[in-house]
Amino acid sequence: MARIDYKHHDKILLAVDCIIFGFDGSGLKALLVKRGLEPEMGKWSLMGGFANKEEGIDQAAARILVQLTGMDKIYMEQLHCFGDVDRDPGGRVVSIAYFALIKIEESNGETLDLHNAKWFDLKKLPTMIFDHKQMVRLAKERLQQKVANHPIGFELLPNKFTLQQLQGLYEAVYETSFDKRNFTRKILSLGILQRLDEKEKESSKKGAFYYVFDKKKYKQLESEGIKMI
Amino acid sequence: MARIDYKHHDKILLAVDCIIFGFDGSGLKALLVKRGLEPEMGKWSLMGGFANKEEGIDQAAARILVQLTGMDKIYMEQLHCFGDVDRDPGGRVVSIAYFALIKIEESNGETLDLHNAKWFDLKKLPTMIFDHKQMVRLAKERLQQKVANHPIGFELLPNKFTLQQLQGLYEAVYETSFDKRNFTRKILSLGILQRLDEKEKESSKKGAFYYVFDKKKYKQLESEGIKMI
DNA sequence: GCAAAAGTGTTGATCCTACACCCATGC
DNA sequence: GCATGGGTGTAGGATCAACACTTTTGC
């Protein structure tokens, strides 16, 4: 077999696009920005950017997430690589999509405004550029699969949350509703929630206990994939 | 926000690497080739190649699979994009890994020989270049997840197969063993197998019925994901 | 007739689902 | 004292796991 050199092959623009999910108590949201460059400037778009030669693609995604949200260490995972020849009318660009889960209340309003970012309910998404709608759809499917077996839903909630908030989140992710008693029993039986002595008193007279996700206990149990739901 | 042009961004070499699985009745196998270019020429490697500007990445993967196996229309799905800066000592190359399932007996021996390809038992893999071992590990995990909910195991078996072969395949994928009665009952209760009148008489006096996967029935049932196992 | 693999049912345990009432509190 | 959301238990059905013997046939 012939000896071949890397030099004779095509180099291609590599982009990273981020599907950023948030939950505000009423529904799953995606964070979109107004695109700041041609083509399609001014249209709604996922937050994205180009990968540089000197950085890994995960670093590129993390960099872009910090740019927009001002937040470090947010949950992020690679989704899929989109590489149709004509996906971007501006040129041949292969895009690696990442999805991220953030706690809405911790994001930085200033950096969001800087990029003209806005939260959209997943069920009321605007028209988006290129194949970004397909990216969001795929990300939502992946989120559903993942949430069923991994404790990542907590990334979308405040550090302390009530069972009702947690149930609301699962209902939003799966677009369905669960029986309160069954849900409570199942989620508590996993043994990964720790109840605080503190109560949330905003939304009821009686008050609902706050819980926190107990990462240590989860790590102990994690024989690759606990059934969350 | 400033108007930016694509031209000012880095272009990067894009490779495609294929994890090709096969099943020969005794264990899950992966198809490796002797690498034909520097660096690491002569070492064991996944079959790969560079993506061209004029083709989509899925097309690139399909092209590379045909090159090696001589087979068209084989089951293939994107796995993950590997983009660490130093993953390839020969230069900055981002690789998109695909995994494929083939029926070993249908592959073309000549094209395999041409690339010095060899089947390796997944439990006895040789040293491989770059991050290819990691790719195989991830592919195996994904295969396990996918096989549990989708009827793709049949891609690894001849068109007609016995229940014993099918069970052997599932046992190989999950590296465990199942109870014959429970397995038979569950798989037949799905209603996606059709029994032929023909028997396989090689491996027993009595003979075992051949079955075929009934794609039509599956499509009817497919309300997104039937539980296979 | 015997060796070798094929084929087939039952039972107990577990898990899942459906369902409704009392509790604590602020007003 | 009443309105509001918080918290809790049970029973029936479905599913899963464990288990062993009979059948067929080529030799």
Image: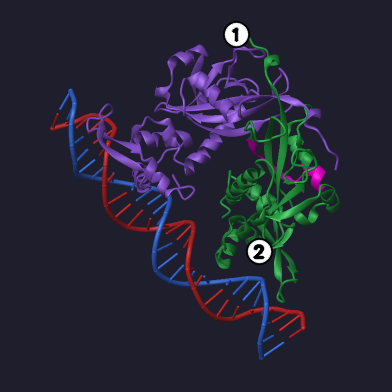
Chain colours: A purple, B green, C blue, D red
Look at 38% across and 36% down and name the residue there. Answer: A166
Look at 62% across and 58% down and name the residue there. Answer: B170
Subunit bearing disc 2: B
- Which image quarter holds the N terminus of chain B? top right
| Residue position marked by numbered label 2 in the rendering | B163
Picture quadrant where residue A46 is located? top right
Choose the circle earlier in sequence order: 1 or 2: 1
Subunit bearing disc 1: B
Question: Where is residue C21 drawn, in percent x and y?
Answer: 23, 45
Label 2 crowd (10 A; few <14 / some 14-19 / many >=20): many
Verify whether residue B67 appears in magenta.
yes
Look at 74% across and 66% down and name the residue there. Answer: B197
Do circles 1 and 2 both sit on a common chain? yes
Q: Amino acid at mark 2?
A: Leu
Picture quadrant where residue B36 is located? top right
Q: Are marks 1 and 2 in contact (CB under 8 Å)?
A: no
Task: Give the label on residue B2, or none.
Answer: 1
Q: Secondary structure at mark 1?
A: loop
Foreground of the two, C22 or A164: A164
Question: Where is residue A184 drawn, in percent x and y?
Answer: 34, 43
Span of residues in magenta: B65-81
Task: Give the label on residue A182, or none.
Answer: none
| Residue reaching furthest to the top | B2
Verify whether residue A87 appears in magenta.
no
Q: Secondary structure at mark 2?
A: helix
Q: CA distance from mark 1 to mark 2?
A: 63 Å
Q: Amino acid at mark 1?
A: Ala
Q: Is residue B71 visible?
A: no
Label 1 crowd (10 A; few <14 / some 14-19 / many >=20): few
Q: Is residue B223 visible?
A: yes
